[in-house]
Image: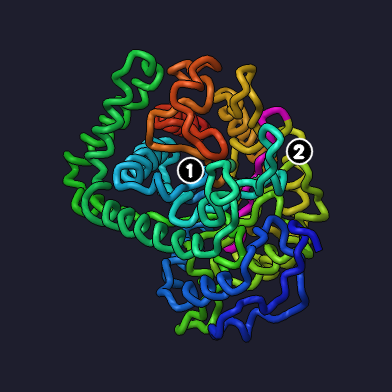
């Protein structure tokens, strides 16, 4: 078989971990897997990963499933956000802090709009692999393997750098544990204190470009003063729940980290609380859907305009046969111009099949285009328009818009055009750092939160 369609035997784990007994079944093709050059190095990496402690615990995954069930019922709203592709070099304390800070700021604004808890989920601590449209990349007559994320190979365009190296999965594990460790410290150690977060947002609102948000900010201020006057217990608001999510793409990474929970005897992918299957790997007969069907984590499936009503029912039957609230999230990514037509038949098919899914809007991946200057970018206006369409469609059908899924960074990059800062095509060259898709910068992320807060409050 070719690289993309390599048959992936199940059980595939090359280690003697107990779950190898449970991952049985027919061989299934796994799309988007690297072609590891050395079988021995792969075995070593898999054994090493299997010997490491879990990154997350089963009980935490169960808590997230409950939170997602609340979002499905409209009693919570999910904010899933982070890098398109994490890199080892960018996993620094400052970057992690700034990304968490942006997510906490957005969550504070959304809480006010939604008047329900915001479920905070980072696209972090595991988002080290990327699906690619081509196996190879050619530059000036030289063809090399495509960059598949730091978990697989290096971005630099040389033969050495692009050769897939299984040891990189071990490095991804360490980078993920270090990241999550810091995130846990930030969110449990006082950094998430609601009063700080509110003060950070005040800084955003006082810039002249953001006068439109002043009213909402004043309302939040008033609510905070009211709470203080009532003697609200701010000690309790110093900590917050924060979950880690990534695309379950490289099965040689996910499988050795899949463990049996000693309490329940069930399998959990302990590489993250929530894992999703992307648009390019969601074949019903493929290894990725089979994988998420076997683990007990809350899981997601991305759905583009190519999704058929029939697919929706079948994937629910495979992944969520009992229709358990919180178990399955559909992350729709239709594009601003398509969502109003493409989403309704999908929702109707899910409803007809008794869905208990959480609906989340990814307004990023259906809105990518190449700018005149040649950068892969997204227009902030399209992103906002897709979220508008998402809310309108769900409200028209009586279903629940349960959350948003966005690619962002806490840094001041110039990768997406538009927003109150009015980033132009000519500005993209100033600070374009993404090794994959263009991300919202800190201010654009916050601006989006203010706009979504208005949509949430506008029922
Ligand atoms: C992604 O989330 O980075 C991604 C590749 O998305 P999709 O699977 O929706 O194309
Ligand atoms: Co992306």
Residue 293 quadrant: bottom right
Residue 77 visible to an observer of this rendering: no
Q: Which mark is residue 261?
A: none
Determine which residue is flagged by label 1. 83
In the depicted structure, whether residue 55 falls above or below residue 186: below
Residues shaded magenta: 326-337
Residue drawn at (62%, 68%), measured in percent from left and top? Answer: 38
**Is 76 left or right of 9, judged from the image as shown?**
left
The one of 96 and 132 positioned closer to us in this rendering: 132
Question: Mark 2: which secondary structure?
Answer: helix
Residue 98 sits inside the magenta stretch: no
Dividing the image into four equal quarters, which quarter contains ligand 2? Answer: top right
Residue depicted at 59% across the width and 25% down the height:
375
Q: What colour scheme has been applied to the protein in the rendered image?
A: rainbow
The answer for how far apart the CA atoms under marks 2 and 1 are is: 26 Å
Q: Which residue is mark 2?
A: 342
Residue 333 counted in the magenta span: yes
Q: Quadrant of residue 133?
A: top right
Circle 1 crowding by C-alpha within 10 Å: few under 14, some 14–19, many from 20: many
Q: Tell me if residue 246 comes above or below residue 116 in the rendering.
A: below
Which residue is depicted at the point 52% across and 14% down? 426
Q: Nearer the viewer, mark 2 or mark 1?
A: 1
For label 2, the crowd category at 10 Å Cα-Cα, with few meaning under 14, some 14 to 19 and many 20 or more, is: many
């Amino acid at each position: 078989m070719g690289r993309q369609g390599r048959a992936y035997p199940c059980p595939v784990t090359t280690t003697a971990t107990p779950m190898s007994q449970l991952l049985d079944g027919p061989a299934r093709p796994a799309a988007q897997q690297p072609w590891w050059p050395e079988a021995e190095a792969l075995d070593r990496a898999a054994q090493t990963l299997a010997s490491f402690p879990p990154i997350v615990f089963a009980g935490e995954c169960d808590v997230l499933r409950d939170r997602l069930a609340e979002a499905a019922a409209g009693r919570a709203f999910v904010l899933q956000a982070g890098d398109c592709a994490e890199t080892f070099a960018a996993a620094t304390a400052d970057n992690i802090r700034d990304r968490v800070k942006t997510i906490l700021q957005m969550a504070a604004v959304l809480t006010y709009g939604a008047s329900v808890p915001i479920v905070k989920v980072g696209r972090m601590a595991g988002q080290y692999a990327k699906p690619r449209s081509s196996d190879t990349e050619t530059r000036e007559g030289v063809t090399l393997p495509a960059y598949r994320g730091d978990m697989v190979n290096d971005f630099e365009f040389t033969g050495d750098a692009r050769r897939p190296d299984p040891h990189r999965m071990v490095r991804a594990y360490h980078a993920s544990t270090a990241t999550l460790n810091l995130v846990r410290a930030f969110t449990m150690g006082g950094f998430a204190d609601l009063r700080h977060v509110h003060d950070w947002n005040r800084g955003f609102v006082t810039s002249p470009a953001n006068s439109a948000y002043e009213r909402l900010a004043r309302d939040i201020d008033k609510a905070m003063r009211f709470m203080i006057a009532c003697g609200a217990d701010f000690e309790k608001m110093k900590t917050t729940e924060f979950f880690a999510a990534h695309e379950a793409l490289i099965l040689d990474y996910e499988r050795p980290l899949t463990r049996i929970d000693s309490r329940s005897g069930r399998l959990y992918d302990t590489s993250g609380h929530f894992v999703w299957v992307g648009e390019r790997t969601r074949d019903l007969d493929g290894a990725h859907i089979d994988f998420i069907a076997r683990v007990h984590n809350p899981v997601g499936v991305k759905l583009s305009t190519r999704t058929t009503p029939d697919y929706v029912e079948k994937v629910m039957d495979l992944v969520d046969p009992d229709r358990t609230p919180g178990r399955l999230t559909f992350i729709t990514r239709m594009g601003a111009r398509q969502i109003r037509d493409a989403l309704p038949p999908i929702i109707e098919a899910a409803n007809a099949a008794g869905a208990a899914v959480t609906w989340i809007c990814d307004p990023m991946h259906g809105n990518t285009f190449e700018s005149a200057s040649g950068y892969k970018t997204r227009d902030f206006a399209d992103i906002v328009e897709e979220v508008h369409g998402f809310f309108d469609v769900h409200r028209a059908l009586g279903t629940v818009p349960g959350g948003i899924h966005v690619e962002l960074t806490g840094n001041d990059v110039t990768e997406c055009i538009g927003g109150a800062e009015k980033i132009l095509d000519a500005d993209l060259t100033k600070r374009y750092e993404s090794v994959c898709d263009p991300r919202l910068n800190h201010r654009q992320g916050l601006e989006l939160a203010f706009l979504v807060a208005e949509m949430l409050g506008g029922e």
